Every structure is written in C-alpha cells, then in structure tokens.
C-alpha cells in the first residue's frame, strides 16, 4: 500500500517561557501554546504516526518548568506516548504497513497531530482497546515492565511495594504485579485513594496516617518486600531500606521526596540489597524495542482479555492541554489523563 497524502503543516503543543523570563521555572512555568509545525518526514528506519491520542506523564509537567532536560536529538514538543495509525514509512521499514493501529514509546514529540519515531519503538494496539486507551498505557506499562520485571527480576510470589499507588504508574504496577502472581502493597495520601488501591487488588497504606515500614512488616510477617518501585526517594530513603527483605531490590524512578536522603549502608550490606535507578526516556531505540517486545508478549494479552484495565481518568482535546495539566496535578486524581487530536 502506498503512503497516504499528507498535509504539510500540523498543530502541536509548545512550551514558551513567560514574557520577561528567559527560561521556565517552577515559579514561572512556561506558557502552553498550540503552534504550527511542519509535518515530520520519516527517516530511514522510522514510521510516521497520525496521532489520535497522547498520554500525559509527570515528565511532561517537569519539562514545562525546566525540570527535565530533553534528551539530545529528541523533539522539544512534549509527549512520551501516543496511539494512532501508521501514515508513512521510512526506507527499510518492513514490519509495519500503512493504516496499522499502533502505539509508541517516544523520547518526545507526542503532543502533535503527527510524530515520526524509530520503528522499533512501536507496538500494535492491544485487541479490544481503542486509541485513547492505548495512548494511556504505553509509558506506564513499559516503565513497570522495565523496572519491576526486567531490572528487579520479579518472580511470582514476590512482595512488591509501590509508592504513589493511585497514579498512572502505580495503578498499572498494582495490576501487573497481581496478574503475574505477585503480592502488591501500595502507598497513597488519602483514605479514598487507599480504597481505590485495595479495589485494584493491593494492600493499601495511607502514608499520612500509618508508618509504611511497620505496616509492611505486619503484612509480610516480618519478611519485608522483595521489590520497591519508588517515585519518592529523598526522605523515604532509610524507611525504604528498612522495609526491604533480604536480597531485596529497590528501584528509584522518581524523586518527588527530594534528590537526597540518608541510607544506612551497613543495613544495605547486611541485607545484600540492590539499589538502582532508571530513566526510560533517554533509552536507545534498541533498548525501548526490547522493553516493548516483553510488554507485547507478556502484558498486552492481559489488557486484551480485561485482566488489566487501562484506567483512563479523563480526556482533553489538544487545545485544552493547560486544563489537562491542572487536572493531572490535582490530588484526588487516579488513573491516566489523555489528550485527543
């Protein structure tokens, strides 16, 4: 099938420093504007996607305030996950066809009507899911697979502590761990969120009213957790180490609790614990392709048969990205926020 005719221009979201400032900061976040861009041409080995929906992630909000540097060579248009249809193929691409329903893991560029991406970073949309649902699961599912299953080497029966259990990554992690035979425990900041976490199948802990270390030890009968998926770090550092089981694996993927924290290294050595950190966004196309291969083989069937729910909280049109960010940041939100084109 030949490439479909393409427009020359598209709309995309841009972050523009506020008037009178040279760069965005937390106190002066960039203005969010819909801008005209040239439709990118797919290079050799790339696929052009006509985007139908794009998921919002915390990294996008951090980029708006200058807190997340765009990887070298990546688009400065925000957006790390999309779903839509293949619109054009670069030279050498044989695994995909025009009009294939696809979702993609990006280094940037997703908040746009079109995006070009290395073909290895694509996955088919799971059966039974639409583009909105697919756009909300790529980044979170890949993050959990990479960190819990590949890096921390999850095994059935493992106790897994998930901080931020009511967010996009947290709700995905709970469902994936449970579906793969693990025992999830998740923290959240309200009783309502704890109720939601427990509805998804995890033991919930309200970190505002309970000491999560004590509760972990109670739930695991003194064993501790085998894996911690940590978006907090900082002030949680020593408590995380205390919560770990012997030979536990603690994976840091965010620093919402600060970039520094005290760790008792004698405790770490005695437990033979592993502490590591990961970022998904700057991984190479080959690495992202490997991650997605595992996701498609092991996790996509669980979305297709309803074992795992995409849990889309709300959608917003591209022109209302600012409102979408406000909703994303509200403390009562659970699940994913998705932009539609």
Image: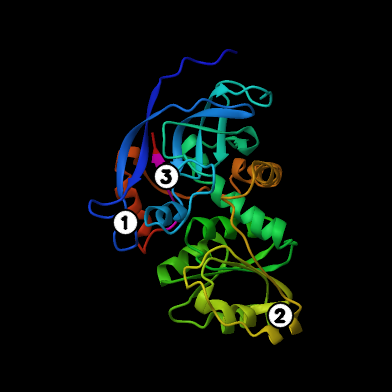
Residue 147 vertical placement versus 41 (above, below): below
What stretch of residues is rendered in magenta? 334-339
The reply to whether callout 1 and callout 2 are in contact (CB within 8 Å) is no
Residue 35, image x, y percentages: 32, 35
**289 or 179: which is nearer to us?**
289
The residue singled out by tag 3 in the image is 338
Which comes sooner in the sequence, label 3 or label 1?
Answer: 1
Q: Which residue is drawn at 46% across and 56% down?
A: 68
Report the side of 24 relative to 178 (left or right).
left
As helix, strand or loop, the secondary structure at mark 1 comes to loop
Q: Nearer the viewer, mark 3 or mark 1?
A: 1
145 lies above or below 115: below
Q: Where is residue 79 in the image (x, y as percent from the top left)?
A: 46, 44
Q: Position of residue 190 (x, y in %)?
A: 41, 71
| First along the sequence among labels 1 and 2 | 1
Q: Gap between marks 3 and 1, in whole Å?
A: 21 Å
Dot 2: element: loop
Give residue 29's mark. 1
> Does residue 288 sit above or below 58 in this rendering?
above
Task: Return the residue at label 2.
Answer: 223
Picture quadrant of residue 252:
bottom right
Q: Residues within 10 Å of mark 1 (few under 14, many from 20)?
A: many
- Residue 215, picture quadrant: bottom right
- What separation in Å lies between label 1 and label 2 (alpha carbons)? 44 Å
Q: Can see residue 264?
A: yes
Q: Which residue is drawn at 30% across and 42% down?
A: 33
Q: How crowded is mark 2: few (under 14 residues within 10 Å), some or many (20 or more)?
A: some
- Across and down, in percent, residue 169 comes to 53, 57
Farthest left residue in view:
20
Q: In which quarter of the image is the N terminus?
A: top right
Q: In which quarter of the image is residue 321?
A: top left
């Amino acid at each position: 099938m030949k490439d479909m005719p393409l427009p020359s221009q598209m709309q995309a979201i841009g972050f523009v420093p506020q008037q009178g400032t040279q760069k965005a900061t937390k106190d002066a976040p960039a203005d969010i504007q819909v801008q005209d861009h040239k439709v990118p041409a797919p290079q050799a080995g790339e696929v052009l996607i006509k985007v139908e929906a794009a998921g919002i992630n915390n990294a996008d909000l951090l980029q708006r305030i200058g807190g997340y540097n765009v990887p070298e060579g990546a688009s400065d248009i925000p957006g790390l996950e999309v779903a839509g249809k293949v619109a054009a193929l670069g030279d050498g691409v044989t695994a995909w066809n025009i009009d294939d329903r696809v979702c993609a893991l990006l280094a940037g560029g997703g908040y746009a009507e079109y995006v070009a991406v290395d073909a290895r970073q694509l996955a088919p949309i799971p059966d039974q899911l639409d583009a909105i649902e697919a756009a909300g699961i790529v980044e979170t599912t890949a993050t959990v697979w990479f960190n819990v299953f590949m890096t921390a080497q999850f095994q059935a029966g493992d106790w897994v502590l998930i901080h931020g259990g009511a967010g996009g990554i947290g709700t995905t992690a709970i469902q994936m761990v449970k579906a793969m035979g693990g025992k999830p425990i998740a923290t959240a900041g309200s009783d309502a969120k704890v109720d939601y976490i427990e509805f998804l199948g995890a033991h919930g802990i309200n970190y505002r009213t309970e000491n999560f270390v004590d509760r972990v030890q109670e739930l695991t009968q003194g064993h501790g957790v085998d894996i911690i998926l940590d978006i907090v770090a900082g002030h949680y550092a020593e408590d995380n180490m205390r919560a770990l089981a012997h030979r536990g694996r603690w994976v840091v993927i965010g620093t919402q609790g600060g970039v520094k924290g005290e760790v008792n290294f004698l405790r770490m050595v005695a437990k033979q614990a592993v502490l590591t950190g990961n970022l998904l966004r700057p991984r190479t196309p080959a690495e992202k392709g490997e991650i997605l291969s595992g996701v498609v083989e092991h996790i996509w069937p669980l979305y297709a048969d309803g074992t795992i729910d995409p849990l889309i909280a709300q959608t917003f049109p591209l022109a209302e990205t600012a409102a979408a960010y406000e909703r994303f940041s509200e403390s009562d939100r659970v699940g994913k926020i998705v932009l539609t084109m």
